[in-house]
């Protein structure tokens, strides 16, 4: 959903670390994470599953991968979602 985002921190060798962020920028899009054959793939996809943009990282270089799901409620709202 719009607002979903994934933050990826990688080891950049002699340069230290680098942080990348993939965000679901428009309504109806979501961010999916897949690990295949030593590659971590983070994609922003449409409702139908068509990838809009994709970021690929070597799994051995990924230090952290944090998913931030879209929160439909405001933190100060005491009522739980239905």
Image (spheres, grey):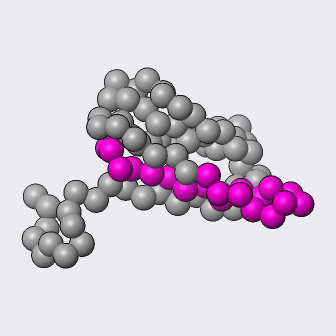
In the displayed structure image, the side of residue 35 where residue 6 appears, left or right: left
The stretch in magenta equals 1-20
- The quadrant the N terminus occupies is top left
In the displayed structure image, the side of residue 6 where residue 46 appears, left or right: left
Residue at the outermost right position? 14
- The image quadrant of residue 50 is top left
**Which residue is rendered at x = 55% and y = 41% of the image?**
42
Task: Please state the total of marks drawn on the protein image.
Answer: 0
- The quadrant the C terminus occupies is bottom left
Is 70 located above or below residue 45 in the figure?
Answer: below
Q: Is residue 12 magenta?
A: yes
In the displayed structure image, the side of residue 12 where residue 40 appears, left or right: left
Q: Is residue 36 magenta?
A: no
* Residue 27 or residue 79, whichever sits in front: 27
Where is residue 10 shown, x and y percent of the image? 71, 56
Where is residue 69 shown, x and y percent of the image? 37, 55
Where is residue 78 shown, x and y percent of the image? 13, 75
- The image quadrant of residue 26 is top left
Where is residue 5 shown, x and y percent of the image? 45, 51
**Which residue is rendered at x = 57% and y = 34% of the image?**
54
**Which residue is rendered at x = 50% and y = 52% of the image?**
6
Is 24 located above or below residue 51 in the figure?
Answer: below
């Amino acid at each position: 959903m719009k607002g979903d985002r994934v933050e990826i921190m990688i080891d950049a060798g002699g340069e230290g670390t680098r942080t990348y962020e993939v965000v679901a920028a428009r309504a109806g899009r979501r961010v999916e994470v897949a690990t295949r054959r030593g590659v971590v793939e983070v994609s922003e996809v449409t409702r139908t599953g068509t990838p809009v943009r994709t970021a690929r990282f070597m799994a051995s270089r990924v230090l952290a991968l944090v998913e931030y799901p879209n929160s439909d409620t405001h933190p100060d709202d005491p009522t739980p979602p239905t």
